[in-house]
Image (spheres, rainbow, N blue to C red):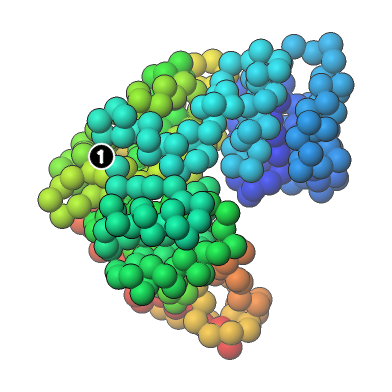
């Protein structure tokens, strides 16, 4: 099994997937734009060979360089989990005749308007939506969509340039603030809880599935730097609360004809229990959510994914044993971390439920959460009972402070 893996060293979790491929016996050839010496150790050790391309910006040039380098070798799969290189991966698949997402399929997973059209055609609930290339388009769209609405880039990430608008003035302001964005999406604002539906698939079958619940919603978090973010992997995905999203997710994967690999869908749950589609990526979720899934089942999905894409199965027991709540802390104050206030008491009381905890060590500078997703702390607590898990997590949100100054 020969796998070409794009960007084995970046973003942060890629080396773990590369290691997973090597662990299931694949021969992994890495292609990246960083020098081999700069690759994280996990990736370097797992790679059979590595090509540093001159630039990913020039797609045709990169394809040609890769083609020359691969001459004489038969590629079984091309894998890529970084949004930026998804089209390049599809082009390589098409030019080497390798199975997996084509360029046309990739567009559906990259373009928020195309994906909503495809989901809507299958009769599934999406927010009212439109693509806008100009102010004129946007004003036309809002007449039909109504308020409250949301304005965001058509291929955005991390809630950047994303605005809720309650009236015409706010809409005008949002359009001004997104002037630098080429194409925007205008959408009906969906009031509700925000959750994920994630899978690992092979041959169009779902081998692993997952629902996680964001608290607070990602957009609120991006605008309020002091809040600790919590993301809860739910043990019972078929309970009343998550089930509508699981059913929606099944419909979406079918409508999009997804075959193999990770998917990461976001959806809204309205107060009446309706699931509304948000977006979907043909890749794993970021921000350590794969780790949280691992803690909820006591498995290694980095290897599980690799086995799925190479051999069409996951042999680990993927049943969920815990609810796992993952919390990111942001330090209070500027400068050097001085204290982990409340930690000792919390560990005494709840230590047995803490699956992992990493805080910026005392004496080190606080981190910039805009650049480092975990900010100044990463904690996973878990419990078979959801109520107990939420309560323990709440203590780590409220009673633990990383104090800088
Ligand atoms: N139609 C919508 N209704 C309510 N909130 C939305 C809507 N679209 C986006 N948001 C908010 O903005 C965030 C970012 O939007 P999203 O489409 O997920 O883009 P990305 O995660 O790629 O930045 C979402 O997580 C959600 O909190
Ligand atoms: Mg999103």
Q: Quadrant of the N terminus?
A: top right
Classify mark 1: helix, strand or loop: loop
Q: Quadrant of residue 215?
A: bottom left
- Horizontal side of 275 relative to 22 (left or right) equals left
Front residue (pair 5, 142):
142
Front residue (pair 190, 329):
190
Q: Quadrant of residue 163?
A: bottom left
Query: What x and y, as percent, mark residue 304?
Result: 50, 28
Neighbourhood count class around disc 1 (C-alpha, 10 Å): few under 14, some 14–19, many 20 upward: some
For residue 263, above or below residue 278: above
Q: Quadrant of the C terminus?
A: bottom right
Query: What x and y, as percent, mark residue 267?
Result: 32, 46
At horizontal 23% and vertical 50% (from top left) the residue drawn is: 269
At horizontal 52% and vertical 64% (from top left) the residue drawn is: 178
At horizontal 67% and vertical 25% (from top left) the residue drawn is: 91
Q: Is residue 19 visible?
A: no
Asked if ligand 1 lies within 8 A of label 1, the reply is no
Q: How many circles with numbers are drawn on the protein?
A: 1
Front residue (pair 294, 183):
183
For residue 106, above or below residue 9: above
Query: What x and y, as percent, mark residue 57?
Result: 76, 43
The residue wearing badge 1 is 125
């Amino acid at each position: 099994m020969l796998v070409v893996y794009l960007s084995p060293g970046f973003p942060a979790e890629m080396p773990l997937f590369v290691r997973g491929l090597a662990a299931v016996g694949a021969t992994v050839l890495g292609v990246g734009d960083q020098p081999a010496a700069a690759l994280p150790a996990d990736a370097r050790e797992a790679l059979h060979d590595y090509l540093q391309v001159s630039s990913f910006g020039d797609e045709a040039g990169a394809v040609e360089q890769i083609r020359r380098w691969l001459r004489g070798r038969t590629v079984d799969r091309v894998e890529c989990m970084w949004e930026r290189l998804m089209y390049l991966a599809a082009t390589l698949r098409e030019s080497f005749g390798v199975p997996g997402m084509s360029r046309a399929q990739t567009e559906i997973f990259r373009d928020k308007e195309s994906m909503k059209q495809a989901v809507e055609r299958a009769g599934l609930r999406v927010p009212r939506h439109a693509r806008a290339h100009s102010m004129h388009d946007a004003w036309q769209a809002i007449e039909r969509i109504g308020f409250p609405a949301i304005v965001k880039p058509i291929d955005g990430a991390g809630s950047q340039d994303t605005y809720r608008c309650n009236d015409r003035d706010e809409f005008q302001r949002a359009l001004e603030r997104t002037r630098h964005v080429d194409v925007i999406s205008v959408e009906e604002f969906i009031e509700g809880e925000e959750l994920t539906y994630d899978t690992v698939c092979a041959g169009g079958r779902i081998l692993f599935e997952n629902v996680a619940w964001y608290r607070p919603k990602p957009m609120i978090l991006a605008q309020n730097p002091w809040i600790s973010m919590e993301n809860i992997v739910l043990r019972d995905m078929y309970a009343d609360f998550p089930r509508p999203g699981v059913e929606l997710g099944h419909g979406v994967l079918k409508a999009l004809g997804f075959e193999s690999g990770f998917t990461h869908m976001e959806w809204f749950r309205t107060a009446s229990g309706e699931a509304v589609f948000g977006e979907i990526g043909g890749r794993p979720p970021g921000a350590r959510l794969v780790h949280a899934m691992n803690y909820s089942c006591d498995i290694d999905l980095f290897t599980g994914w690799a086995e799925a894409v190479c051999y069409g199965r996951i042999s680990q027991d993927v049943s969920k044993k815990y609810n796992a709540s993952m919390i990111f802390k942001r330090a209070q104050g500027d400068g050097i971390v001085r204290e982990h206030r409340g930690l000792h008491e919390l560990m005494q009381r709840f230590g047995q439920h803490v699956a992992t905890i990493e805080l910026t060590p005392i004496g080190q500078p606080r981190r910039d959460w805009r650049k480092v997703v975990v900010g100044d702390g990463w904690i996973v607590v878990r419990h078979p009972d959801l109520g107990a898990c939420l309560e323990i997590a709440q203590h780590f949100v409220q009673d633990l402070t990383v104090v800088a100054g």
